[in-house]
Image: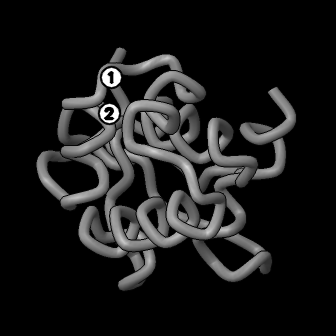
Amino acid sequence: MRSTVEPTDDAFTPAAIGRLLKTRRIQLEITLTEAARRADMTEAQFSRLEHGRGNPSVSTISRAMKGLGMTLQDLAGGGDVTARIVHRGRPANAVDWEAINSG
C-alpha cells in the first residue's frame, strides 16, 4: 500500500522537502548523480524531489534523506515530528517518525 505525507506544517510540503534536500546536497558538495546513487534512485527521481514535484511517498523521502545522512526528523529541525499519513486517500493514525527512522 502506498503512503504519502499529508502536510500538517509547511515543512512537509514537497517544495520545502526539496529545498532541504538540495541545501544538504550542496553542503555535502556532491552532484545530483552522487546523491541519487546514495539514495538508490535515478537522477530524474532525485531531481523531481529537489524541485518539489509530485507527491513522494514517505519511503522515497526517507531514502533520499538517508542517502544524504539525514533523518525524517530533520524536516522539523530535529524536533518531534508528527504528521498524518494518507493511505489511498484516507488518513491513518499519527506516525512515529522515530520508529520509521530506526527501521
Give the percent coordinates (x, y) of residue 61.
46, 43
37 on left or right of 33: right
Q: Amino acid at mark 2?
A: His
Q: Is residue 97 above or below residue 90?
A: below
Crowding near the residue tagged with mark 2, few <14, some 14–19, many ≥20 C-alpha atoms within 10 Å = some
At which x and y percent is residue 12?
40, 69
Which mark sits nearer the N-terminus, 1 or 2?
1
In the image, what residue occupies the spot 30% across and 70% down? 13
Circle number at residue 2? 1
Give the camera-side residue of 77 and 40.
40
Please give the name of the residue rendered at 39% of the width and 32% of the height, measured from the top-left corner.
33
Kindly give the residue lying farthest to the left in the view shown. 54
Q: Amino acid at mark 1?
A: Arg
Identify whether 15 is placed above or below 65: below
Judged from the image, the secondary structure of the residue bearing numbered disc 2 is strand
User: Where is 65 relative to 63, above or below?
Assistant: below
Q: Secondary structure at mark 1?
A: loop
| Residue at the image position 49 percent from the left and 72 percent from the top | 23
Q: Quadrant of residue 44?
A: top left
In this rendering, would 73 be left or right of 8? Answer: right
Could you tell whether 1 is left or right of 24 in the image? left
Query: Do the residues bearing badges 1 and 2 touch, measured as CB atoms within 8 Å?
Result: yes
Depth check, mark 1 against mark 2: the one in front is: 1
Give how far across and how far down residue 63 sits, in percent. Answer: 56, 32
The C terminus: image quadrant? top right
* Residue 75: mark: none
- Would you name the residue on which mark 2 appears? 87
